[in-house]
Amino acid sequence: MNELPPQPVKLPPSGASLHPEPPPPDWRDEALPPAAPPRLAHATRGQRIALLVGLVIVAWLALQLFASILMPFVAAAGIAYVLDPATSRLTRAGMPRGVAALLMIVAVIAAALLFALLLYPVILSQIGLLIGRIPEYVLLLQDWAREVITHLQERFGSQVVDDKLRDLVGGQAGAMLSFLAAALSRVIGGGFALFNVISLIVVTPVVAFYLLRDWPGVVARVDSWLPRRYAEVIRAQVREVDRILSAWVRGQALCCLLLALFYAAGLSLVGLDLGLIVGIAAGVLSFIPYVGSITGGLTSIGLALAQFPGWHGVIMVCVVLVVGQILEGYVIYPRFLGDRVELPAVWVIFALFAGGAAFGFLGIMLAVPIAATIGVLCRFWLRRYLSSALYLDPPGGGRPGA
């Protein structure tokens, strides 16, 4: 084979190194050293308590300052909360969130308009009937009071019960009935006038639409503000509040609707003149435990005694009330509420009255959510206490011989 001639080797110039150093890298190619993570100072217990107290104070001041204008926004938030599950189902079915929210709000407005168109004239006519019969009811009540006083005179003697007391009781009974009837008409008229206020007619549906459309984003934004250390604990408690509150709101709404329909239909069928108003009021007020039943029962029996000459009509009214109580206690409430709602009746009554005394109708609207939240937090801290050393420490600190 022909071999190639050897190639001459080029030696570096004199004084040069055989292993030259590589050229220095360009400054633009140098990678900056990784920045050290910032050292975060741990929050103290005092800072956490101050944050919690500050949030409570800000919320209380906001309610105090803006209570007169918050009602449409609170009502809109309640509507969005109730309609969110149905809107989410429509969204998962492929409908855009905005279209689904608009559809749900339009459905609510249509239902309210249907109620106003169908029932409002009937209720107004029955209110006029009640006002027209107030003098008759006053005379009947005065006669009944005089008969009672006369019977007491015959039983205990005129020295204990005199004629002046009989006249006084009869007159005061009539004045009391007139006052109650006037107050009832003002309350009913004011309640319907409330729906004619521009803030509730215009602002509430608009705010409810935007809240319902942006509900997932609002929840995600609030979730991002949670302190990282307690985020999971707070989420767990919020889920518990949502479970209890959603079961109570939706279940109680269905119970009130069914009871209102039953009482209104039953009392109207037995011939009670104001049966529609009394039945609807009893059903609506049933969200306050025992209040709806007691109010509807006393009112309907009193009207039956004044309207029907014999006992047959009164007995029929009592049968309607008893059947309604059986349905409420054994069918409706166990079916739609059951044991999912951990809100005792006494706690709900106290919350509603306390909220009404503090902030009026706005306080009544916020009473049940706040009561559910306080109940969940109290149960959480009670579990923490029962599993802590503060509760489990034995007597004497566990020292031998103690």
Image (cartoon, grey):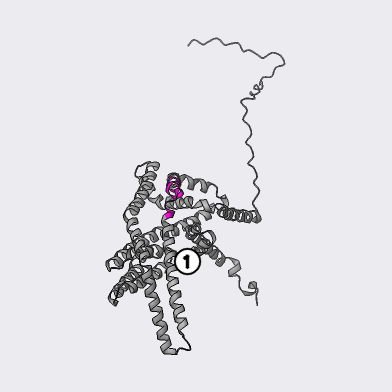
In terms of depth relative to the viewer, which is nearer, 107 or 100? 107
Q: Quadrant of residue 21?
A: top right
User: Secondary structure of the magenta portion, mostly?
Assistant: helix
Measured as percent of width and height from the top left, residue 378 is found at 53, 63
For image coordinates 51% across by 61% down, the residue present is 355
Q: Amino acid at mark 1?
A: Ile
Q: Secondary structure at mark 1?
A: helix
- Looking at the image, is 307 positioned above or below residue 67? below
Q: Is residue 386 left or right of residue 84?
A: right
Quick check: is 397 in the magenta stretch? Answer: no
Compared with 128, 313 (above or below) is: below
- In the picture provided, is 4 more to the left or to the right than 141? right
Give the x, y percent position of residue 3.
51, 11
Q: Residue at x 47, y 69 (%)?
A: 346
Q: Which residue is mark 1?
A: 349
- Quadrant containing the C terminus in the rendered view: bottom right
- Image: magenta residue range: 193-207
Left or right of residue 383, residue 97 in this image: left
Does residue 233 lie above or below 327 as drawn?
A: above
Q: Is residue 113 visible?
A: yes
Q: Position of residue 76 (x, y in %)?
A: 45, 50
Identify the residue shown where x is 35% and y is 63%.
277
Indicate whether residue 204 is drawn in magenta.
yes
Q: Is residue 38 left or right of residue 75?
A: right
**Neighbours of disc 1 within 10 Å: few (<14), some (14-19), many (20+):** some
**Nearer to us in this view, 213 or 108:** 108
Q: Image quadrant of residue 299? A: bottom left
**Residue 199 x/y as whole percent:** 46, 48
Residue depicted at x 57% and y 66%: 385
